[in-house]
Image: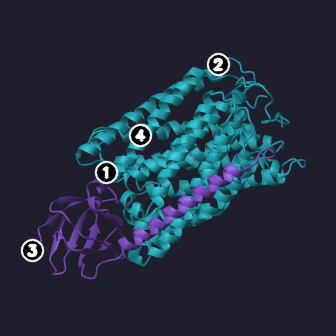
Chain colours: A cyan, B purple
Amino acid sequence: MVLELQKPRPIWQIMFSTHHTDVGLLYLILSLSFLFMGGALALAIRAELFLPGAQIIGDAMTFNRIFTVHGTTLIFLFILPFASAVGNYFVPIMVRYKDMAYPKLNAIAFWMIPPGAALVWLGFADFTWYAQPPYSIISAPGPAADMWIFGLKILGVSSVLGALNFVVTILKCKHPDMSIGQVPLLAWSFLASSLIILVAIPTFAAALLMLLTDRLGVSGFFNPAMGGDPIAYSHLFWFTFHPEVYVLVIPAIGMMYEIIPRFSRKPIYSYNSGIFAFVLLSIVAFSSWAHHMYATGMSFTEKTVFMVGTLAAVPASAMHVFNFIATMWNGRIKFSTPMMWAVGGIALFFSAGAGGVANAAMPLDFATHDSYWVVGHFHLFVMGTIAFGSIGYLYYMFPYVTGRMYNETFGKVHFVMSFIGTILVFFTQHILGLYGMPRRVFDYPPIPEWIAMNQIATIGAMIIGISMIIFLANMIYSSGKGKLADTDDPFGLGGKYYYPFEAKNPKH
Amino acid sequence: MSGHSNWPEWIYIAVVIALMCWVGAEAWNAERLVEHVPADAEVIKVIAQQWFWTFEYEDGTKTIGDLYVESGKAYKFEITSKDVIHSFNIHDYVVLMDAVPGRVNTVWFAPTDVRTHDIQCREYCGLIHYNMRGTLHVEEPSS
């Protein structure tokens, strides 16, 4: 089975297609382009922080704009579209339907992303991806800030449309012979994350409109000078974006659920506990948002409630880790590139989760809040878990998409360098946070511990940067000139692949 | 699914849940003690604005950037902001509280050594956020 580029076609046939694999390919190319663009900004940030004082980036304003666009890009323009790419390719096949439920809506959802991305990148706002008022109302320079607000609005609508499509495809278009309890875990992960999107995103959509009218001066929802409350924005924002963390991580875990059993040559240890943990995570996702706000002056009772809500997410995440390890236990594991990425991702998922427990405990949060600890913590999730799962899955789907194999050696080199780099950057940033370095700073005083930790982190980032160049070269070269893949068994695992099924009705 | 039992998973989940209960209970207890402000704590008003700190003591004197306290005494900070959100942070004493315009947040501490410590802003507040710093001077007790 080949999902895509068997016969070269003119590019407009792919661009104006509504077929799920074509839209998937568009999502894939867009998300990978923004991975490299956002990654380049990260390297600029790390290079600047190698030494105290201004070196690479001339002034604080440029630096603030860079980390704002870095965060916005990698969350909204890499992780989310990448998950949509995988979902577009595989969900219809897994539920055995000819396409997504609404093919035109699917294409519209994709084509809303480029204008949103253009607004974010051309504006280059400086108020961090959090856009905290009153800074974002009274202090952030326009039109960059307004362009960011409109860009995010468009991206939010796009994600809602995409999520709606996945929910309908999975629930209403699955093959009648297949019960919902037989749908593969990857498709289940899209169902769970799409439902979270539908519940969570409207809150932020409302907050963005209020932010815009506040900036225009016609309202004062979040502006204390007009009687508003900036902390209300924090609640609206985190009510969307704490669940959004699960929107990002659940599909990545779903991808690992495809890779781990396949390369362990064993069925999943417990399919039911996988589903149970997905459902549980999507519910507790909504019980923990204000753990981002302990230091805003919350009462003891509020903090306690949200600490308990946060700790409740740990058993569900731990069930996934258990399931992965129990699946690999006694399996005949083949450590091809996708398997290495998935296993590395699980290890980093565990470390990120352990750090998260420390964050959630109220007194410890006051030592780590808004310090580099937090930066290290969530990057272990977004880079160590989500990007690792995604990149592993990209290697896994590569032969199905292009009909050719990537270079295995370079794939492994990419993994090893990225794994070492990720540990050097983000474990170090945890320590840096304990030394007290605040996040989002352009410059720092020459404290010896801070300099040492920053330099280790920068070296790690450069190692990741080099590995990503190897990755890019491998993908470009192999998709054109790589050796032809045996699409029945590209990884030489033997046995029958239970998924993906043959693509139905490839001409559509 | 079929063919094997799930009891190792249930034991594992029970252990994880027990561990989380322990973490939660310890954190609850520690936070309860930490938030208990001593009755004799001296009040210092902390006013944040882009991009410096102003401190106002009980006797009405004000200092900018430098905070003077005596070792061995308890102090309660009443923190607010004049423009955007900042975060008042003395990392060495794990003092951290957001300075929110329109609100007064409180946090307390009791210094025990005699030396200087860094004060910094931990919440992004714009152009000079990175350099919104101050110094805490802990002095010998006067009496």
- Which residue position is annotated with label 4? A425
Circle nearer the N terminus (2, 1): 1
Q: How crowded is the residue under tag 4: few (<14 C-alpha within 10 Å), some, or many (20+)?
A: many
The amino acid pointed to by label 3 is Ser
Residue A130 visible, this orientation:
no
Q: Secondary structure at mark 1?
A: loop
Residue at 34% in and 50% down: A61
Find out whether the residues at labels 2 and 3 contact each other: C-beta distance under 8 Å.
no
- Helix, strand or loop at disc 2? loop
Q: Residue at x 63, y 46 (%)?
A: A322
Q: Position of residue A361 (x, y in %)?
A: 46, 62
The Cα atoms of the two marked residues, 4 and 2, are separated by: 32 Å
Mark 3 vs mark 4: give the one in front.
3
Q: Considering the image in quadrants, where does the C terminus of chain A appear?
A: top right
- Residue that badge 2 annotates: A482
Q: Quadrant of the N terminus of chain A?
A: top right
Residue B142 is tagged as 3
First of labels 4, 2 by sequence position: 4
Report, in whole angstroms, how far the alpha carbon at label 4 lies from the one at label 1. Answer: 15 Å
The mark closer to the camera, 4 or 2, is 4
